[in-house]
Image (tube, rainbow, N blue to C red):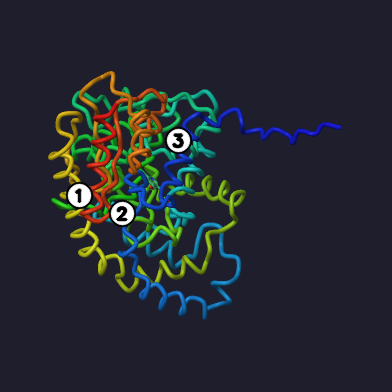
Amino acid sequence: MNAQPPRPAFAGWLSETNDITARFLAAGGVPGLINLAGGLPAPETYPGEAVAALAAEAARESAETLAYGPIHGLPALRDAVAARFSTPEMALGRENVLITTAGMQGLSLVGQVLIEPGQAVACQSPAYLGALDAWRPRRPAWRPIFPERNGFDAEAALSGAQFGYVVPNFSNPMGRLVGLERRLELAEAAEATGTWLVEDDPYGALYYDSEPLPRILSLSGALRPGRYRGPVVYLGTFSKEIAPGLRIGWAIAAPEMIEALAAAKQGADMCTSPLTQKIALRALETGLPEAIRPGLLSLYAKRRDALAAAMAAHLAGLFDWEVPVGGMFLWATAKDPAFDTDRLFEAGLEAGVCVTPGRVFDPLGEDRRSIRLNFTLNDEAKLEEGVRRLTKAARAM
Ligand SMILES: Cc1ncc(COP(=O)(O)O)c(C=O)c1O
């Protein structure tokens, strides 16, 4: 008899970053620890009362909302998403929309549908950890790309890749914007090279200092008139616009891509909860995202300013950073190339603050010089105290 339990087949791709990830995800539960690591909205912004009313209404429509739903999502919600993202230059219909169990499922389905093991994925680097986690089991060959840098060549970046992955609005972790011209170049390059381009956009509503730039999806749609059939796969979510617990997101793409993603979704969860889909539909119909947005933006802008001020007061000698104009994160890089942010992560925990080390966002796992700091979860006093603790930890190293 073998007394050992069987080894999970996925153990081979569990990377060493999983350990760090598990620890920073657990940071929220450690008493007294200031969590600057997670990508969490401020819970006080969740519209509990409004959602409770919509939920009660949705639950009463039990024949629809407590049954299994259609794989592609409730038709009315697909129509509402199509209407919300159509522009004068780009028409979307229901056939362009798949409702997903938030943005994370969109990423996971894209990986299932598009990644051939060993083939290139042109991935904006540093990249959202969740995307790397979703795709790593498919064993792609990572091709890091840098669309926010000068000299970026969109065609060279996408050529021959299974797909490109970009977060043009306040990328997680860098909090940077991809500019308008670059967005257009990416849309054109995807078309010219025949490469799928995944535009992941959870932070598109969180512009603090300016009006939103056009989505790559809309720019791509404007290249060909009529119903959208282009190469962009747009992933959206209500997680940062309403609340992550709804677990409602959407993929917008050419109909044949929507069908492929739906086939993968059938094998993943059959359908996203019709109850939360109905809540999301009513939230859209009643203008809930627009109603709560001003409060969200002013709260987060103040917190962004508080973090930037604390950084400038305490860490200017050790790190460089750009103050983000939106999103949820500030990305800082140590001036000293030999500085080790894996060690700062450990020292920070000792000092009572948790930040995310850059390595977990690097597809190649090499970055030891950067950290990501979240500014949306904590109030101004905690942000200041968190930076003080981090400075103490960094100076002691
Ligand atoms: C870049 C990016 N994509 C996707 C997601 C997925 O979020 P959700 O599954 O809550 O929609 C996140 C969450 O933080 C993110 O930062």
Mark 1, mark 3: which one is toward the viewer? 3
Question: Horizontally, is 59 left or right of 301 in the view?
Answer: right
User: SS of the residue at dot 3?
Assistant: helix
Q: CA distance from mark 1 to mark 3?
A: 25 Å
Q: Nearer the viewer, residue 121 or 98?
A: 121
Mark 1 in CB contact with mark 2 (< 8 angstroms): no
Labelled disc at residue 377: 2
Q: Residue at x 60, y 52 (%)?
A: 266
Check disc 1 and give the amino acid type: Arg
Q: Which mark is residue 329?
A: none
Instruction: Give how far across and how far down residue 324 sits, in percent.
Output: 19, 43
Residue 341 spot, x, y in % from top left: 33, 29
Q: x, y percentage for residue 3? A: 80, 34
Place residue 291 in its image quadrant.
bottom left
- Tag 1–tag 3 contact (CB < 8 Å): no
Q: Image quarter for residue 167?
A: top left
Q: Nearer the viewer, residue 244 or 346?
A: 346
Residue assigned mark 3: 20
Looking at the picture, does residue 120 appear above or below residue 40? above
| Comes first in the chain, label 2 or label 3 | 3
Residue receiving disc 1 = 304
The vertical placement of 49 against 396, above or below, is below
Q: Between disc 1 and disc 3, whose residue precedes? A: 3
Is 154 placed left or right of 230 in the picture? left
Instruction: Tell me which corner region of the image, top left, top right, bottom left or bottom right, holds residue 333.
Output: top left
> Which residue is more in the foreground, 154 or 93?
154
Q: Residue at x 46, y 43 (%)?
A: 107
Q: Amino acid at mark 3?
A: Ile
Q: Is label 1 within 8 A of ligand 1 (CB to nearest ligand atom)?
A: no
Specify the amino acid type for callout 2: Leu
Task: Name the residue at 42% across, 42% down.
Answer: 24
Q: CA distance from mark 2 to mark 3?
A: 20 Å
